[in-house]
Image: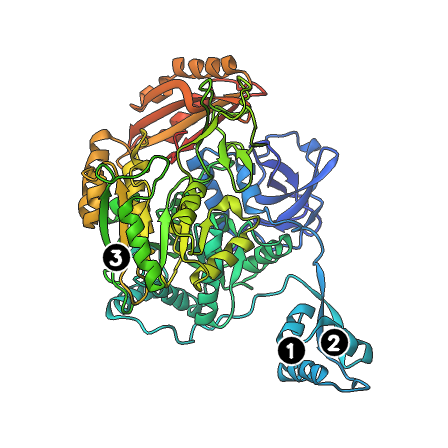
Amino acid sequence: MTSPRFEEGALIGVLTTQPLDRVLDYRAPRGGCAAGDHVEVPFGPRKVTGVVWGQGAGDYDPAKVKSAIRVLDLPPMRAPMREFLGRVADYTLTPMPAMLRLATRAPGLTDPPGMRKIYRRGHGQPARMTPARARVLDLLEEHDGLGFMLGELADLAGVGSSVVKGLVASGAVAEEEAPRDVPYPPLDPDMAGKALTTDQELAAARLREGIAAGRYGTTLLKGVTGSGKTEVYLEAVAACLKAGRQALVLLPEIALTAEFLTRVEARFGAKPAEWHSGVTTTERRRCWKMVAENGAQLVVGARSALFLPFHDLGLIVVDEEHDTSYKQEDGVLYNARDMAVLRASLEKAQVVLASATPSLESWVNVQQGKYARLDLESRYGPAVMPEMRAIDMRTEEVPSGSWISPALKGAVMQRLERGEQSLLFLNRRGYAPLTLCRACGHQIGCKHCDARMVEHRFLKRLMCHQCGETAPMPETCPNCEVAGKLAAVGPGVERITEEAQALFPDARVTVLSSDLFGSARALKTRILEIAEGAADIVVGTQLVAKGHNFPKLTLVGVIDSDLGLQGSDLRAAERTFQLMRQVAGRAGRAEARGTALLQSFQPEHPVIRAILSGDEEGFWAAEAAARRAAGVPPYGRMAGIVISSPDMQQAFDLGNRLARLDAPLRRIGAQLFGPAPAPIARVRGRHRVRLLVKAEKTAPLQSALAEWAAQVRVPANARLAIDIDPQSFL
């Protein structure tokens, strides 16, 4: 579809990233422009960039309308992308400039192309030939004039960079400047993948049919852990690439990308483009531009990759679609899983939602016929599902200050004797969640938040998990100043690691927690080392439940299976079920069968019983019935409103005023709860007040919320955030 074109001087509407929440009128620049063009425009004394959104509104004095300065040398924003941003803005009640910032936040987009040095075969010959020099020249001649970066060439030839530099000096190797923003190496969809089982091939064929149809569709790919879901959806990626369209694979965790990229390279002969916080700014700019210019066939990324300017998007895969990290909790509040479905519908693309433990929302959409469903019931190859048992902690004799039961200890000992790995899982970071003074009862809290400081003994610091504030571990109680009375209460993964080291002194014990790694690269490296057998016992948080494959791991021990069942979160049962099933699925992914042992003080709890029995359909049906009866998502609609201010009274006054002006909500039959202090009532020095709106599934919630919130003026130092479909109630 051709975008409308505007001749020089015509009135155009330009959306900028400036916080104005409206499209601004300008005159088309010299040479004219088209809808979707990126332009530079005057904004007061500054020059800012924006996108031509369409025809100008004409509601501003024509004599004062300024001309856009120029059209930028960037691929235009396509109509489906502009519609996508508008639809997301309407759904999440986000100002359009914030949406545009999300879609154009690659650094240096308007800068001239960056340059880098590359090395090719030159015309000269070195005065003296050595074996190292010969390897470099042979490699360059073998690749027929292709250019290499210095480190890449030196590594492939097995020489130091000084050898290459010496060849440059002799003219045998040519050193050239080349632009950084170049297309990614082509992927070959015709390369043979792994041999698929009958079930996998049937599922892959169904996905290929969807791609070939060239229309929108969403499929839930449900397969037990280790069933080969990745290989199946890579077949859909291959079909998409054969059709000449682009594909996007979303992953919930950066640490998963290293293993996944290796699998992609093995399947297609080259690595795809990456988009996540661990990528350099130069590579982010290259990825943004190449995606827009069709120079990247496949992108593997975090949730924000959904807002890249794809030239022709044919497939979106949301791996581990149930994962809560797909929900953006600050800035633009969106759920990438749901927005992936929206984007695909606008791009006439297919969506694959892959998970061993789907979200209840996706399960219900299948039940209602909105999504298709494909099932993989068994593990790939010789692997079988782990045996799952509960350890009743009420009958175990566990010493005071210990958390590993005798039954779990014995199971770990058996694995050590067989040379197999064990995982001890506790979804709690740090050493202890609470530091208590035994003299006065004081609990050490954060100065900026209403939250306890968590001891991180391995880092020798106290840390607030709300704001990130850290402090050295005190010698005396900050309240009564008595020394030697501070005690750690409760376990975190560091404390379990300490206990494991004492119980198994000859074992190699390692801890996997995001706090202990300075970079994503360091974390990826450690995960690969563990997969290769560099540890006997792994102690980890939920980080280890996210799709990692440890072939030698045959035992999973969950320290506190009841932890997630506490509190009033409406998704507590669902999340506990998903997490326990996922972490149990790390065991026995190779030949040896795995075992998962769940330590529990309430093994008769319906959720624990469902986890052990494996009756997933029964669990989802019961959970769906409970949600339907309560009228909550996915059978009703909810919105969370958080008001924050340095002044607690100001936050409550604003909340009370909103509560009194609830007529727009009552008109659609919505219920308003609150205002009330948030469960964590102060974060980063700001007092937080929550309100909750609940409405029928078909109620026009967004328009009512917009009208309701527009009735009040938010003070300059206060903030009001509206979260549609909240995942967190803190």
Q: Which residue is mark 1?
A: 157
Can residue 399 be seen here? The reply is yes
The quarter holding residue 219 reads: bottom left
**C-alpha span from label 1 to label 2:** 10 Å
Q: Tell whether label 2 touches label 1 (CB within 8 Å).
A: yes
**C-alpha span from label 1 to label 3:** 45 Å
**C-alpha span from label 3 to label 2:** 53 Å
Q: Disc number at residue 671?
A: none
Residue type at mark 2 is Val
Residue 187 left/right relative to 538: right
Between circles 1 and 3, the one closer to the viewer is 3
Q: Disc number at residue 163?
A: 2
The quarter holding residue 414 reads: bottom left
Q: Nearer the viewer, residue 708 or 232?
A: 232
Q: Tell whether label 3 touches label 1 (CB within 8 Å).
A: no
Q: Quadrant of the C terminus?
A: top left
Q: Which residue is mark 3?
A: 386
Between circles 3 and 2, the one closer to the viewer is 3
